[in-house]
Structure formats: structure tokens, C-alpha cells
Amino acid sequence: MRAGIRIAGILNAAYGLRHTKHLSSFDSRRLPYYLTFASVVAVLCSISASNCLIAAAVVALAVQHFRQGGVLRFPPVAIPLGIFFACTVIAVALSGHSWHEGWPGIRKFYLCFVLLLVYSTFRKLSDVRRLVIAMTAMTTLSAIWSLWQFYRKYQAAQALHQDFRVYYTVERITGFMSHWMTLSGEEMMVLMLLGALLLFGAGCRLNRWLVAAGIVIVASFLAAYTRSMWMGAALGGAFLIWLRDKRWLLLAPVPVLLLLLANPFGLGERIVSIYRPAGDLDSNQFRVVCRRAGVEMMKAHPWFGLGPEQVKAQFKAYIPADVPRPLPTGAYIHLHNVYLQYGAERGLPALAAFLWFLGKMLLDFLRASRTLAPAETERRFVLYGVIAVMLAVLSAGWYEHNLGDGEILTTFLACMGCGYAAIASPRES
């Protein structure tokens, strides 16, 4: 069933691509763009399909470059990203473990080709708009499937006469993805881009459909029970609303209060658990243990860390002695904090390079956003959208190792590539 829906989604995206004005007649010179576009949309339903399309796009772009003189552009973050990669390789080499064990940490750098691809092939702001619409369409399909999963889980809890929140928290909706955190991370980024398009982009006949799609995605996003992503979306969304009209922020508490009072499907209790957890059902204390263990790892191995993929294997050895046993219930597979994870795995120099990489991009987008002319609606929506994505992802990263997820990382890098494409695109008149 899930495979059928994924195929239907890909076909739907492909159908949309065929019928856009921009692609009404196939232009072989834009093949790298088509493949890049498809790879970004595909990651919302299948990481394997996306990886294959990334490889095809890289080959097509390289062939075009050498045969036709096509331009290869990489965003101005090559130095920090290169240092981060070098630190990762050194961390693997000095970890005392086999290269096979550390290979997943190195392999993920393959996804950085997305930065090259998007920045090199997206030449117009309309390319980014089409991508956001296609991503919204695919995410909506995933959200619809996830809401069906939610309904089935609710039925199962009722049949077993169990409290729904207790039953559901440990086995939530996933949509087209394999985990609820992946689903929520992708939905969060798409919502930031969609929000920016609706608030700042030039209107189009699809706006009503996009609003409807956004409502479906928000429903799935809430149903996933992912508090870290909720907080990230709240920060990114507040940024967009602040820029659009500061007065709208006065209404922001209203939907939260309604959810707290109505508590549909335990959503209100889940919100309350952010500051008042219900014992082991919520993972607050478990994350505290992870953070403390991560700090101990960095103290013991400040320069090159334990090595990629070693946090899980050596976690118990770094739990502080004063932490009560048994440990709080939770998944002790990583540190559930992207910054501590990289510091513990690869050392403080690697963490510094990673922060430089992120900070450089954020600073570039903020600077470009300050030079916008009033008429530049398309550039405005792209830049504001990618800044909102960064704020959402980086804040959620304090509570989850989100950029360690291949699907989320690919989507995030594609958004960053769109931001640099917007900076480099011709000025709007």
C-alpha cells in the first residue's frame, strides 16, 4: 500500500512537471535541472530514489560542463564544509575502529552535491517557486497517508481499550518516511517555505489549493507529536509573521490555548509535557541524560571525538555517575542534539567548522534580505523562507539530531541552495 502511494506521488509530481509552462517543451540543456528538481521532490517519499537522481544529476551536469561549457557553482561555504569533512575523516582514522564502522558519517557528505546542483541549475526565481509547489504537493500526499495511519492507530487503541496517548506516543505516524521525526522535519521545512510563498510571494491561481495543502500538512505535523519540531516551526513561523505584520503575533497564543483546552487526541497534554512531562511517557529526562553524556564525551575527547557512529556503542561508559539507575526510558542511539552529537563524534574543531558552515549561510541570507527592493516579491519569499527554515531546523536541532537524517539533510541543503540561487539570480525590475 505504502509503495503504491509513493509511486503515485512520484507520478503526480512528474505529471506536474510535464504540464508547467516552463517545461512545456523538453530542453536537453536543462536536463541537470530536471534531475535536480526531481531528486529534491523525491526525497520526500524515497531517499533511495533521491540518491539515484542526485547521482544522475551530477553526471548530467558534469557532462554538460565539459561538453558545452556549463557553469558549475558551489555556494561560498566550501571552506567550512571542507574543514568539517576533513575533521570527520580524521576522526574516523583516529577512532581506533574500522573504516567500515565510520563510513556512514563520511558517506552523508555525498548529499552536499545538492548544494552544487541547486545553485548551478536553478537560474530563475520561478524555478524555486515551482520547486516549493511541487514539494508542497508531495508533502501533502505524505500527510494524507499519515493521517490515515493516525486514524488506524486511534482505532487500534480503542479496540485494545488503552489510553490513546500512551498507546500512540511510542509508535506514531510516519507518512512516506520510516520515522515520525523524519516526517515532521520535512513537513516543518515545507511549511516554512509555503508560509513564505503565501505571505510574501506574488499571488497566483494556485493559492487556494496551497492554503488547503498547508492545512493538511499542519494537521499531520501536529498529529506526529514531535515537540522539538513544533518549537522549531513556532520560531520559524514567528519570524515570518513578524516580517509580515507584527500585530499578528498577538493572535499566536490563541490556537495553542484552544489545543490546551480541547486536548484533541491528547495534543494538549503533549504540549504541556514540554515543561511538565508525564513520567517515562515523555522523553524530557532521557534527553537530559543524553546531553550530560555528550558533554562528558567532549571533555574526554575534545580534539577528534569518539569517531562517527561511536556514540551509540560507547554511550554507557560516559553516563555521569550521579545519574540515577535505571535510566529513563528512551532511544539511546544518539545524543538527540545535533551540536553535541558532532562535537562528541568528531571533536570541537569539527563542531566549530559545522557552526561556521551554518552561520555563514544564515549571515549571507540575512544580508541579502536587507537589500531587497519593494518590488522583489519572489526574491523576498525565497530569502525569508530559507531563513525561516534555518531558524526552525537549527532550534529543533537542540532537541534532536535532525541533520544526521539523510532525508532531512537533503531537504535542508536544497533549501540552502535555493537561497543562494535567489541571491545570484538577476534583480527583479
Image: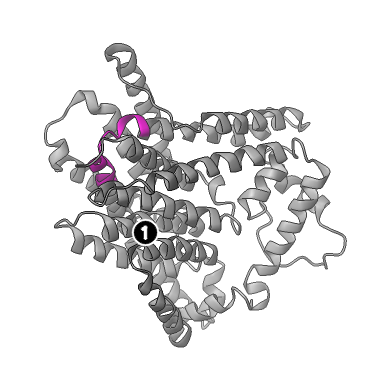
**Measured from the top left, where is residue 161 in percent x and y?**
51, 83
Neighbours of disc 1 within 10 Å: few (<14), some (14-19), many (20+): many
> Quadrant location of residue 31?
top left
Relative side of 107 to 186, left or right: right
- Whether residue 367 appears in magenta in the rendering, the answer is no
**Measured from the top left, where is residue 340 in percent x and y?**
68, 50
- Whether residue 125 appears in magenta in the rendering, the answer is yes
Viewer-side residue, 382 vs 412:
382
Image quarter in which the C terminus is found: top left
**Measured from the top left, where is residue 356 in percent x and y?**
58, 40
| In the image, residue 85 above or below residue 320 | above
> Quadrant location of residue 145?
bottom left
Image quarter in which the N terminus is found: bottom left
Q: Which residue is most to the bottom?
A: 261
**Measured from the top left, where is residue 422 in percent x and y?**
33, 40
Instruction: Give the tally of numbered discs.
Output: 1
Relative side of 129 to 117, left or right: left
The residue positioned 31% from the left and 52% from the top of the image is: 381
Magenta stretch in the rendered image = 119-131
The residue positioned 51% from the left and 57% from the top of the image is: 181
Viewer-side residue, 423 vs 385:
423
The residue positioned 20% from the left and 42% from the top of the image is: 17
Residue occupied by mark 1: 191
What's under tag 1, amino acid-wise?
Answer: Leu
| In the image, residue 252 above or below residue 58 | below
The residue positioned 60% from the left and 36% from the top of the image is: 104
| In the image, residue 236 above or below residue 36 | below
Q: Main secondary structure of the magenta part?
A: helix
The answer to whether residue 8 shows anywhere in this view is no
The answer to whether residue 397 shows anywhere in this view is yes
